[in-house]
Amino acid sequence: MILSKSCIYGIQSAIYVAAHDADGYVSISQIASELQISFHFLTKVLQQLTQEGIMNSYRGPRGGVALAKGSADVSLYDLIAAIDGTAIFTECMLGLPGCGVAEPCPAHDHWTKLRVELTGIAKRLSLKDLGDKASELNVRLAKEFRYATSQTNGLK
Amino acid sequence: MILSKSCIYGIQSAIYVAAHDADGYVSISQIASELQISFHFLTKVLQQLTQEGIMNSYRGPRGGVALAKGSADVSLYDLIAAIDGTAIFTECMLGLPGCGVAEPCPAHDHWTKLRVELTGIAKRLSLKDLGDKASELNVRLAKEFRYATSQTNGLK
DNA sequence: CTAATTTAGGACAACGGAGTCGTAAATCTT
DNA sequence: AAGATTTACGACTCCGTTGTCCTAAATTAG
């Protein structure tokens, strides 16, 4: 898996919040139920995003989380870096520790090129861009899939 | 981590075997000690490669593993597919289950493009290509690194 | 002030990947 | 045939990620 589940949850939540925090904070329980994510687990993921300054949180009634900046100023890179770290943007594919410009590993050149592309894409893609493309349909599809699999799993 | 440790071990071993199996089988213990990998663990990784038809194995004195085909006929893709599976070549980055051409996820287009590139590179890169670039230096660097970290870890 | 709401955060279980160890099976050497 | 060598493979431990549950702290509403 390229991104951890925590990271995927964080990204999905950020997209959701960007679309729903116009009039205040969005409660984590709402995000969790809408995106079918464990509430307590999501709490910790979003804590990371608030600690990294990407979101603000507020306790108490009508509390929740909200973006700390405008959705155009948060990149996919920021989200990934905040939760999974920057390893996927910097690490050698084959995990060879000495791999670098001076002593490239066998796949170094190819992988480096892809990593640079990936980094560029992640830095250019803002939450706004993601949100523009993220329709409610995706959420619905995700729900249906999870429902379908939980059904089949339940039958085993 | 893009590739699992098992996968990295498998790739490194395959490169090593390609360079050393000219006159028969290469023992797993030799590979393990040369590449600083746990012998018993490597045994299981290479078992996967033999079960997938990438390597042949032979028990008994002078036994070991050898490539089943010429090094030019084994691609990086084959090795990754045999150990980690093809998920990284096919899966949606954000893990959205419904993501596809019909209902692309927000990062779909960008990630698909990268995945296609990655797949092409992995399929074109043969073990021979990797071996040509993989100098003994890389092995040495890896060893030195592991030695250095085991030292520092030991001091904690 | 009290009760309700909501995030913060600790404790712990479940799970899978990584790594260790012991034994079985195959094969060669003598 | 006996013993040594080497892969095959099952059982187990270790550890990080995922997920659950409970309590504390902040804040609002009445």
Image: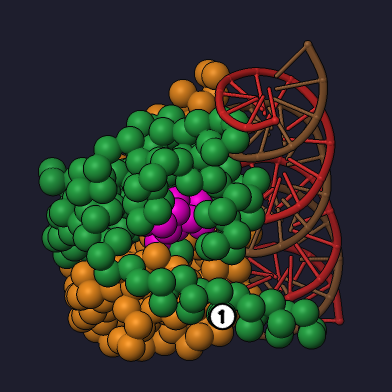
Chain colours: A orange, B green, C red, D brown
Residue B6 % position (x, y): 50, 51
| Residue B116 in picture, x, y percent from top left | 15, 55
Seen at 33% across and 68% down, the residue is B134
Q: x and y percent of residue A37 in the render? A: 50, 52
In terms of image quadrants, where is residue B110?
bottom left
Asked if the stretch drawn in magenta spans residue B23, the answer is: no
Q: Nearer the viewer, residue C20 or A82?
A: C20
Q: Secondary structure at mark 1?
A: helix
Q: Nearer the viewer, residue A113 or B90?
A: A113
Residue placed most toward the observer, A78 or B17: B17
Q: Can residue B149 be seen at all in this image of the molecule?
A: yes
Q: Quadrant of residue A127?
A: bottom left
Does B104 sit left or right of B86 as displayed? Answer: left
In the picture shown, does residue A44 fall above or below C15? below
Identity of the residue drawn at 71% across and 82% down:
B151
Residue B122 visible here: no
Q: Which residue is mark 1?
A: B144
Q: Measured along the vertical axis of the image, is residue A29 above or below residue B154?
A: above
Most common SS among magenta residues: helix
Residue type at mark 1 is Glu
Callout 1: few (<14), some (14-19), or many (20+) C-alpha neighbours within 10 Å? some
Residue for point 55% across, 19% down? A156
Q: Quadrant of the N terminus of chain B?
A: bottom left
Give the magenta-colored segment's residue range: B2-16
Q: Residue at x 30, y 61 (%)?
A: B131
Q: Quick check: A125 above or below A32?
A: below
Q: Is residue A80 left or right of residue A27?
A: left
